[in-house]
Each structure stands twice: as structure tokens, then as C-alpha cells.
Amino acid sequence: MTQQTTSGSRGLLQHEGLIFEFGSNDSTGVDLPEPKGRKSRLGGVTRAAKPALPGLSEPEAMRHYVRLSQKNYAIDLGLFPLGSCTMKHNPRLNEKVARMPGFSDIHPLQPMYTVQGALEMIEQLATWLKTLTNMPAVAMSPKAGAHGEWCGMAAIRAALYARGEGETRKRVLVPASAHGTNPATAVQCGFKVQEIRAAEDGRVCIDDLMSKLEGDTSDVAGIMLTNPNTCGLFERDIRKIADAIHEAGGYFYCDGANFNAIVGRVRPGDLGVDAMHINLHKTFSTPHGGGGPGAGPTVLSDALAPFAPVPFIRHDEDGFHLVEDAGTGDAKDSFGRMCAFHGQMGMFTRALTYMLSHGADGLKQVAEDAVLNANYVQAKLKSVMSPAFEGYCMHEALFSDAFLKESGLETIDIAKGLIDEGYHPMTVYFPLVVHGAMLIEPTETESKAELDRFCDALEAVAKAAKAGDEALKSAPYLAPLRRLDETQAARKPILRWTPPEPAEAAE
């Protein structure tokens, strides 16, 4: 039985309610004198009552947010096993560089002659990305993965219209195991999605793909394919797929979410890729959202480079400058502008710092260690869990729920039990092509000791589940909150705090 406490706290983890529940609307942590000698300029629309905001002293406010932070899981706390997300350590050197004057304190509307160093930094990062992918051009302005997808597919759309086939080539092939953003992006760009089923080994069914390219292919716009794919496997027929799509008159978009598994080892341009976004927060260690907007630069082939979005950087005898206007000069074929400004400086500086710290040989080792760690996890756990596919994996180990068949328990019970062991759960029920999927991506960040610690915890939970331990159906027991009804939480979230009704006065 879980020990109950009077305070609601657990050991050194303090209980914390909503800020509205303990803050007083009638007080404030700062006393400000009434302004004197000023007339209101609000024209009679001044507030009739005080805002219902909780007043807190400075220590109360500080403690509130520190206590909330202790309820959160973070990569600085422990291994983050989310598959398909590449949650890796962000070196503190990256943070130091991102805060350097000239990067952190510039404004996007400054005259270009005052930000030459920043523009050169962006151009140097672009050079690294083009070199690592063997692609001739890169659009730096996309803000994240899905934004980068949109950039690539918009470039494909522009290229098709330039060929006079924009209205006829509308079919985009997408594997069943793809990230959900792939078909969504294709539809948003005006294409129609045709699904390619998965083969028994977790890769694209090449026979199904080829059957969809038989006969009249005048409607084929391209393919959106992730490699390595979401099952953690390298698509062995990737050149055959690229050649078939090109022969049909389409373009090859590669989802670069899993570039961390092959960076420095495989250049997507050598595989026949026409466009690929690169999540800087996955491969090159910039934070997931916590450091501000993300970044998803999109590399482009010779066929798509003329259609890249503005703005982009050019370097000539007068220095670095931004090409801002689509339809003119170097940007005469550009499909337009994706966002107001060029990109996210904090993400760019962190990514380039990571690249320069590792060097070309170090980035190659990143991929090798990420793949090694994933295969180690798979080898450690395959005796108690069910690998989804035979053989070695790439950067992530994928398990099905087959080992739970006779237990009466499910994947969700494994995930919740892992919380009690002090770990954020792995990705569950994705990819959809694997029943009860459990997807684990340790990345290159983790040491063997930490991998052993995680595997021991997951193995214990898996053994308990196989034994039919009913207690797991109510896990977690040690988290700040017990098991929630996640379906109702998603469908009927409570987004507004409502003060309790005042007790009725006794008659």
C-alpha cells in the first residue's frame, strides 16, 4: 500500500496545486505606488474590477515553478527512450555559444552590414548540411520537421507546375509506416495520397510499390519515404525505389527525421533523394522546443534547387546578403516565402557548434554509437520481450506486444509500470504497422551503464506483465498523479480553472 501523507508530498517531492488555488486575488508580491499626476488615456474603458490573478511573493512564485519542474521528465534527468524522437543530450557548450553577443541580441530587421557574422554562420551551417547530404542546395528557413516537409513538397509542386504538369501529377506514394505528418503535408500541398503497404520484414513492400507504378504513371508526383524508416530499419531497396519514381516522372522526398542513424555514414543525395528535411533538434542536438522554435532545414537536389523558398543567402564581393524577393534575380523560380524571417538563430548556433565539436569523424561515430546502443537494447530485452522483426535494427529497437498474449495485460501497462521505475515510457502503439508497438531509441548519448540500468527496469516490468501481475493495470503508483483516463483527457480537456462555488449561507 502506498504511504499517504498529510501534506500530499512524497519524501522530498513537494505537493503542488494550481497557482490559482493558493495565490490570493487580493494581494500581490510587489507593492507599487499609485501614479500621480496622470490622466487615463483609455477613454472610459478602464477595468471595472481587479484581474483575477493570484498574488504571490517572490519565494512563493519561485517555489511553485521549481516544484512543477520536479514533476517533469527531462533528458538531463535520465535516459529518454522515446522512439522516433531522438531525445539526446544538448551539450552546454552549445548553450554558451547560442548566448554569445552577435547571435543572441540581434534583430532580424537590422541592416545586413551589421549582421555579417551571423549570416556567415548560417552559410557555414548550410555548407555542412549540403556536404553531409551531398545535396547542392538547402532552404534554411523551415522551422521544424513538418515545416521542412511542406518546404520540400512545395518545391516539388512548383517544379511540376514549371514542367506544365502541376494539374495532372497529383499522386504521392506514402508507406504505411510513415510519420503521420507525411500524408498530412502531401494533402496540404494539394496532392492525393496512395498508401504503400509494409512487407513482412518491416520495410516497404517493393512488389506493392512497383504495382502502383505500372501502366499510366502520368499522375505520379512523387514518394514520401523515411530512411531509416519508422520501424528502425534501413530500406535496402532505396536506389531501386528512387529510380522507379524518377522513371515514372516523379520526385523523391525523404523524411530526414532519422538522419541521426546515418549521418556521416550515408549521404541521401547518393540515394537519389530530391528533397529531405533535417531536424536540427534530432540529429544535431538543439533542444526540442525548450530553446524556442525548432529548425528543419530542407536540402534540395539540382532539379528542385531553383524553386527554394526565400529568403536565402548569397555571398559575393560585397559580403553576405539575403535574397528576399521571389520572382526576381536568383529567386525568379522560387515558390515564395514560408515565414517572415530567415530562421531561428539559437538553433543554428547550437547545431553548428555540435558539428564543429564533433568534426566529420565524430559525426560518423554519432551514427555508429546510436545504432550500436539500439542493438544492445534489443539484444538485452529480446529474451523477455518480442522484437517486431528479425535481425539487427538501426537506431531504434522495436518490440510488439506478442509476449503479452496470454497475460491479460497490454502495452499501456508496460508503459505505466516503467514510470514507477523512474523512466519516461518509450513510444507506444507506433508505428501502426506493429501491433502494440513499443519503440525505443536510446541515441548515442547513453553509456553502457545507463543502458543496463534502463534495460533492467524494463525487463522487470516485462516479466511482471508476462506473469499476469494485475497491479500493473493500475500503475503508476509513485507518480505525482495516478493513471489517468487519457481518452477523456484528450477529448474533453479542462483548460480553464473555475473557482469553487461559495458555500451557501446557513439559514
Image: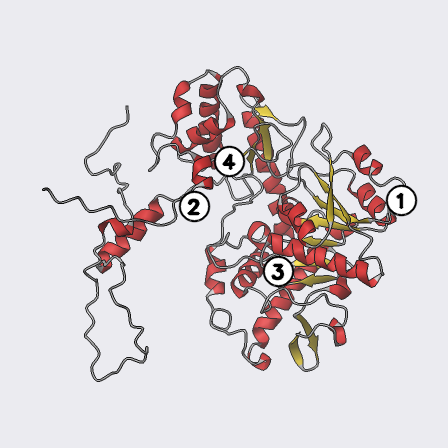
Quarter the N terminus occupies: top left
Question: Judging from the image, what secondary structure is the residue with disc 3 in?
Answer: loop
Q: Is residue 292 above or below residue 209?
A: below
Q: Which residue is mark 4?
A: 426
Whole-percent x and y of residue 82? 52, 39
**Mark 3 or mark 1, earlier in chain:** 3
Q: Which residue is mark 1?
A: 216
Dot 3 alpha-carbon crowd within 10 angstroms: few under 14, some 14 to 19, many 20 or more: many
* Comparing labels 3 and 1, the label whose residue is closer to the camera: 1
Q: Is residue 74 above or below residue 38?
A: above
Left or right: where does residue 370 sit relative to residue 413?
A: right
Amino acid type, residue under disc 3 in the picture: Pro
Left or right: where does residue 185 sit relative to residue 103?
A: right
**Mark 2 or mark 3, earlier in chain:** 2
Q: CA distance from mark 2 to mark 3?
A: 26 Å
Q: Residue 194 appears in which quarter of the rendering?
A: top right
Amino acid type, residue under disc 4 in the picture: Met
* Comparing labels 3 and 4, the label whose residue is closer to the camera: 3
Amino acid type, residue under disc 2 in the picture: Ala
**Mark 1 or mark 4, earlier in chain:** 1
**Cβ atoms at labels 2 and 1 below 8 Å apart:** no
Q: Which residue is mark 2?
A: 74
Residue at screen point 69% across, 55% down: 189
Q: Which residue is mark 3?
A: 142
* Comparing labels 2 and 1, the label whose residue is closer to the camera: 1
Amino acid type, residue under disc 1 in the picture: Asp
Question: Judging from the image, what secondary structure is the residue with disc 2 in?
Answer: loop
